[in-house]
Image (cartoon, rainbow, N blue to C red):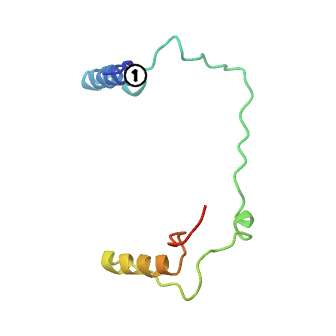
């Protein structure tokens, strides 16, 4: 067993014990306190820029009108075989590198 695996098991065990004892901070109980940074309460708020709806208008759709939407597993495999025969996945037999 590697040291990182042991650390992961111990961390999971600490979290389990904290949840069993109904600790309200159980999800962070296994975090090492020496690595956690203290919160700066005087810091300015972070400005998060969300994308606008107009940002997605210029995105192109890769689907073609003649593409079929296949949900049946057997039909998916047949569709994959057809596409592979056309060389769409780089599975050409005489391909040289």
Q: Residue 10: percent from the left, percent from the top?
A: 32, 19
Q: Quadrant of residue 71?
A: bottom left
| Residue 69, above or below 51 | below
Q: Residue at x 50, y 72 (%)?
A: 93
| Residue 66, above or below 9 | below
Q: Nearer the viewer, residue 67 or 25?
A: 67
Q: Residue 11: percent from the left, percent from the top?
A: 36, 22
Q: Nearer the viewer, residue 12 or 19?
A: 12
Q: Residue 15: percent from the left, percent from the top?
A: 33, 24
| Outermost residue toward the top in this view | 34
| Outermost residue toward the left in this view | 20
Q: Residue 67: percent from the left, percent from the top?
A: 52, 84
Q: Nearer the viewer, residue 4 or 54?
A: 4
Q: Quadrant of residue 77?
A: bottom left
Q: Is residue 14 left or right of residue 97?
A: left
Q: Residue at x 35, y 81 (%)?
A: 75
Q: Nearer the viewer, residue 55 or 3?
A: 3
Q: Residue at x 69, y 66 (%)?
A: 56
Q: Quadrant of residue 57?
A: bottom right
**Which residue is label 1 attached to?**
4
């Amino acid at each position: 067993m590697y040291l990182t695996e042991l650390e992961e098991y111990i961390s999971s065990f600490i979290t389990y014990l904290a949840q069993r004892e109904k600790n309200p901070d159980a999800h962070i109980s296994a975090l090492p306190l020496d690595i956690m940074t203290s919160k700066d309460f005087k810091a300015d708020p972070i400005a998060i820029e969300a994308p606008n709806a107009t940002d997605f208008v210029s995105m192109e759709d890769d689907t073609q009108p003649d593409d079929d939407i296949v949900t049946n597993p057997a039909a998916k495999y047949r569709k994959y075989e057809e596409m592979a025969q056309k060389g769409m996945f780089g599975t050409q037999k005489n391909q040289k590198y």
